[in-house]
Image (spheres, grey):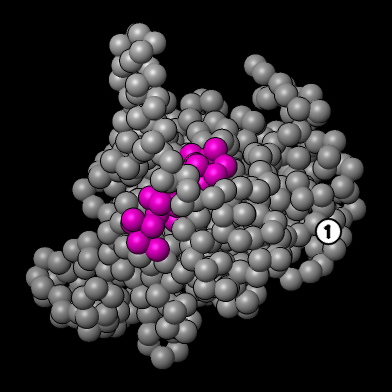
Amino acid sequence: MTVQVLIPTPLQKFTADQATVSLEAASVDELIKALDSSFPGLANRLCDEQGKLRRFLNIYVNSEDIRFLDNQATVLADGDEVSIVPAVAGG
Amino acid sequence: MRCYGSATRIFGVTSTLTSRTFSGLRCRECGHTYEAEARHVCEDVCFGPLEVAYDYDVIRARTSRASIEAGPTSIWRYRDFLPIEGDPIDVGTGFTPLLKANRLARRLGLKELYIKNDGVNMPTLSFKDRVVSVALTRARELGFSTVSCASTGNLANSTAAIAAHAGMECCVFIPADLEAGKVLGTLIYNPTLMAVRGNYDQVNKLCSEVANTFGWGFVNINLRPYYSEGSKTLGYEVIEQLGWRLPDHIVAPLASGSLFTKIRKGFDEFMKVGLVDEKPVRFSGAQAEGCSPIAQAFAEGRDFITPVKPNTIAKSIAIGNPADGPYALDIASSTGGNIAAVNDEEIVAGIQLLAETEGVFTETAGGTTIAVLKKLVEQGKIDPSETTVAYITGNGLKTTEAVSSVVGQPLTIDPKLGDFQAAWERAQSLQRATWESVGV
């Protein structure tokens, strides 16, 4: 499954300033591992020591928050767009 | 130009004070520090939110009750506590009335109740004018010429208006289903207005993506550490307007949770620098049942927030994924306060109750606050002897849809005395039953 990942500005230092990257992954968990393989150190930014997504980070698959899907086990399909978004104040 | 108040100041020409009282930004979670730039998350370590770090020894040396009282009748009387370096963008924001609400207090069974009425804040009739005044001042200092925001309505109004005053380019994003008053109240300032087909949390996501690729100053994204500090002035003003004392209990609406945490920070800072005697203050938060992720977590004793999809008339506080929710939870728990939710019917009744008893017409967020205040009193969770302050953060004229079906119609008559007398008698007999049941 090739998915497009939108990288937030604070993480673009890991991706050589790329705002979008394409990776192979079948789930969000796999995607985090794939990101870390391509851009070492990125997983430590995204997840805590237990591998759980940090509480001030949100991940969306095709504009849907993964907490309304299957969290980090959310399945990815070919062509999905995954967005990593730090928490934002209101509104 | 206009001037008012004992400080006799003309807006827009507040005198320059150049030295700043803040050193940079600090992560609220891990304490890692950063330069005072346009950044909002702890990108080197944990992605926690960044806050402005102040030098309180400098602030303590520079401020006193007298120096504050001699300042302008706006938020800028507290400028030593705000993260700017040069001249503020001053549109007369802040120092809104603190109304002693005797009739509402009697109705609810409280002895001393105050309404902090930011529904008459300047220039756009909500507390957002406070945060935007600070954010755009800092945006200008950091070199931004275009400013933007994701908004549930009030922030859009404020960003567009103050950007117009400052001569900045402005592009704001809102959910497409907002109330007509909030949309018109943004368009009139001639920004670029993007109505996004989605809820606020989806608008936020889009704006974060836009912020990644456009070099704009987003007031609630990359300028958030500065923006959010503006809400502290709601804490300072209440202390000063109560005669330099703290209330016992406050009730405020909860959307992202930022306002709640910053009122607390405002109280704490005035205690820290010795401007007010230390004492505990209980913090209670108000949410709409149709979007109550923080109230749900509080009721279940959780320390984490599970996001929800909003479905309420209280659109201005309809944030399903509240960024500062964990902090709001902690404040309510640690101060002995509560977080409660009310349904849409109770919200409308809250708007009516405040209007009929105090002559204050608030929007749905204010209706939520009043309804929760009433509920907490009825449940015995607010002591009648406590000095209580309810924060009203927006104006009812922006959300007339919420109450248009419950306020009735005018009595239409011909210009004849007989017609008036007949209509008057009819009105009196109709209202008598209501008066007898109210008894205020």
Residue B359 counted in the magenta span: yes
Image coordinates for residue B254, horizontal then vertical, percent: 48, 61
Instruction: Specify the subunit that label 1 lies on.
Output: B
Amino acid tagged 1 = Val
Which residue: 62% across, 54% down?
B105
Image coordinates for residue B117, horizontal then vertical, percent: 59, 43
Q: Secondary structure at mark 1?
A: loop
Which residue: 56% across, 54% down?
B107
Residue under label 1: B276
Quadrant in which residue A25 is drawn: bottom left
Say few, some or many: other residues with alpha carbon within 10 Å of mark 1 (under 14 / 14 to 19 / 20 or more): many
Residue A6 lies left or right of residue B96; in this view the side is left
- Depth order, front residue of B330/B19: B330
Looking at the rendering, in which quadrant would you find the N terminus of chain B? top right
Part of the protein shown in magenta: B342-368
Image coordinates for residue B159, horizontal then vertical, percent: 47, 37
Image coordinates for residue B248, horizontal then vertical, percent: 71, 65
Residue A7 counted in the magenta span: no
Residue B235 lies left or right of residue B225; in this view the side is right
Q: On screen, A72 above or below B231?
A: below
Residue furthest out toward the top: B415
Answer yes or no: is residue B33 visible.
no
Which residue: 10% across, 73% down?
A77
Which residue: 82% across, 67% down?
B278
